[in-house]
Image: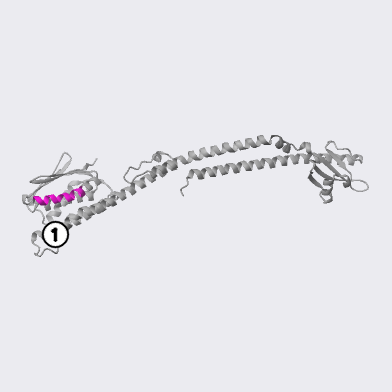
Amino acid sequence: MFKSIRHGLFAALAGFTILLCVCYTGLVLVISYVTEDMLIDRLLEREAAAMSAHFRLRGELPPPGDEMMRVYRGAAALPPAVRERVAAGQPRAEISTATGQHYHLRTLDLPAPSGPLRVYLLADVRPLLVVSQLFRDVGGVLAAVALGLIALALLLAYLLSRRLVLPLQVLANEVRALSPQGPVELSARHRRDEIGYLAQKLGATITELHAALNREHAFTRDISHELRTPLTVMNNIVGPARAAALDANDMVQLRAGLGEIGGAIDVLFALARAEHIAQEAFDLRGCVEDGLLRLLDNGAWADDRLALRLPERLEVWGNRQLSALLVNNCLDNALFHGGAGTRLSLSFADGVLSLSNTVDPARAGMTQGFRHGQHLLRRIAGAMRWEIGFHAGAAAYRVDIAPRRAR
């Protein structure tokens, strides 16, 4: 069952407050009674010292200087409750009786010619018991004040626990209200304490988790979307219903379909790892030339059908691997959908890289298949925050790529 941290903190503060109140109350009572007993004992000690000095000088017992005290020459004359303590062998004692008397006893052995003289100094100290009398007189007021202070302490503990835990509760509510597709905005991230650090790290972690989940969903969706068309073409060619042998055109389409599948897989895995691939400034012309050289080396294109109008260096900001995949996919699609005699033109103007290929009217139907790769190319461009546009015509097909320029 969910339990708020504020309740636990309030219980801890309240318990600590009540414990302090009880401990200090008990300590005050102990100190009060001990002080009272020490005062009475000091009075008896002074009286006993005075009587002993007087007896040594004059050989007789003087009357006590305090009317609360009396001297007894024998134990038989003591009150019954006191006599029982003496009979038990206690030279000093504090005795309370049921009739209200409160005695303090001190036994004295005075030196005499015939031997030590034992006398008993007994004091009825009821008038000096101010602590008990104080609690009887103003005990109700003291209890009311103590309860009021405890209530005030509990209120302060409640307010303090609420104030201390409120930022954590706000953070917990914001995290609980987050949606997988929504932005991660935690209000505590600007605090300059541990809660602010926690909010920053938690927000960054949740953002990374959402990005990872989105990439996983996109990867699953793209696998289904991008591979369906080439697999359908291949199944139609090599299906069991076809009895005729595969001709050259079929083999070309099969190889192209396999190439598309391999390229799509490379791109999808690159996009899945896009967050972990650093972006940097690089020369986009180098990626274009590498893609063209790859086609020339494979014999898929002749350089006499190529028109290249690019600056000597084309510094852009992005990811070199994704950029190469983007350019290579555009070139492969231009070759496949444009036909063997297609002419390719690459130019750069006003911050836009344009790749245009001619289209054989006899292959116009095949250019529509290029649509299944547009989503993937948009994904590649979006991962680098580039813009890409597709323009299909009756005699030509053009792709416009607007990269981010390097600062």
Q: What is the quadrant of residue 94 in the picture? A: top right
- The three-letter code of the residue at mark 1 reads Asn
Magenta-tinted stretch:
364-377
Residue 332's spot in the image, x, y percent? 14, 52
Characterize the local packing of mark 1: few (<14), some (14-19) or many (20 or more) Cα atoms within 10 angstroms.
few
Looking at the rendering, in which quadrant would you find the C terminus?
A: top left
Seen in the image, is 132 located left or right of residue 4? right
Q: What colour scheme was applied to this rendering of the protein?
A: one colour
**Secondary structure, magenta segment, majority class:** helix
Seen in the image, is 154 located left or right of residue 175? right
Can the viewer see residue 196 in this picture?
A: no
Residue identifier under label 1: 236
| Foreground pick, 265 / 101 | 101
Residue 126's spot in the image, x, y percent? 78, 38
Instruction: Determine if the magenta segment contains residue 365.
Output: yes
Q: What is the quadrant of residue 157 in the picture? A: top right
Seen in the image, is 186 located left or right of residue 63? left
Residue at horizontal 11%, vertical 58%? 252
Seen in the image, is 55 located left or right of residue 98? right
Residue 365's spot in the image, x, y percent? 10, 51
Can the viewer see residue 167 in this picture?
A: yes
